[in-house]
Every structure is written in C-alpha cells, then in structure tokens.
Amino acid sequence: MADCEKLQTCPFFTDQMSQMPSVASLMKTTFCHGDKTHCARYQVLMTGVPVPADLLPNDVARAQQLLSHR
Ligand code: SF4
C-alpha cells in the first residue's frame, strides 16, 4: 500500500492529536501507511466537506454522519 498523500498536511498524522500516542501509532500504520480508503478523515476529505480536527481515522460512523448532512 502507498502512503496517504495527505501525510504532510493531515492534523492527525502531524501529531496534533498526540494525547494517545500508542493508539495514534497503530492507526497511522493501519490507515496512513496502510489503506487510506478506510480512513474516516480521508473519506470526509475526499468529498470536500471540512474535516473536524478531532475526527479519528477509525471513526467511520461519525464520518458517515457528517456526510449524510451535506
Ligand atoms: S489520518 Fe487519514 S487522511 Fe490523515 S494522513 Fe492518515 S490516512 Fe491520510
């Protein structure tokens, strides 16, 4: 899998969400260096809807909720 092209600008990846470093590290491996298409942030980003700063990559339910209100 290729790295997500948003690595340089994504607040999650650039550690503005560093409260839970071990969990964040696991999610980076899974999504940012793994399958970005399963990342909640990426899914919202690709629609042009503003991504909440605190949206976690594994919170697909919240992403779907955000996208259902566009
Ligand atoms: S959190 Fe999602 S959007 Fe951000 S760099 Fe990782 S895969 Fe890409």
Image: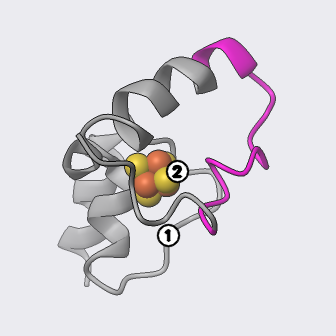
The total number of labels drawn is 2
Q: In the picture, which quadrant includes the C terminus?
A: bottom left
Q: Main SS of the magenta segment?
A: loop
Is 50 left, or right, of 59 in this rendering? right
Whether the residues at callouts 1 and 2 have beta carbons within 8 Å, the answer is yes
For the record, the magenta segment spans 9-23
Instruction: Give the amino acid at mark 1.
Output: Val
Whether disc 1's CB lies below 8 Å from ligand 1 is answered yes
Residue 67 belongs to the span the image colors magenta? no
Quadrant assignment, res 65: bottom left
Q: x, y (%) of residue 7?
A: 55, 57
Residue at (36, 37) in percent of width and height: 31
Numbered disc 1: secondary structure: loop
Looking at the image, which residue is at 67% across and 58% down?
A: 11
Residue 69 picture location, percent across and down: 26, 77
Q: Amino acid at mark 2?
A: Leu
Residue underneath mark 1: 51
Calculate the distance from the C-alpha at mark 1 to the C-alpha at mark 2: 7 Å
- What residue would you read off at disc 2? 55
Q: Nearer the viewer, residue 18 or 35?
A: 35
Quadrant housing the N terminus: top left
| Mark 1 Cα shell of 10 Å, populated few (<14), some (14-19), many (≥20) | some
For the point 25% across and 81% down, which residue is it?
47
Horizontal and vertical percent for residue 3?
A: 38, 49
Q: Callout 2: helix, strand or loop?
A: loop
Q: Does the magenta segment cover residue 10?
A: yes
Judge left or right: residue 23 versus residue 68: right
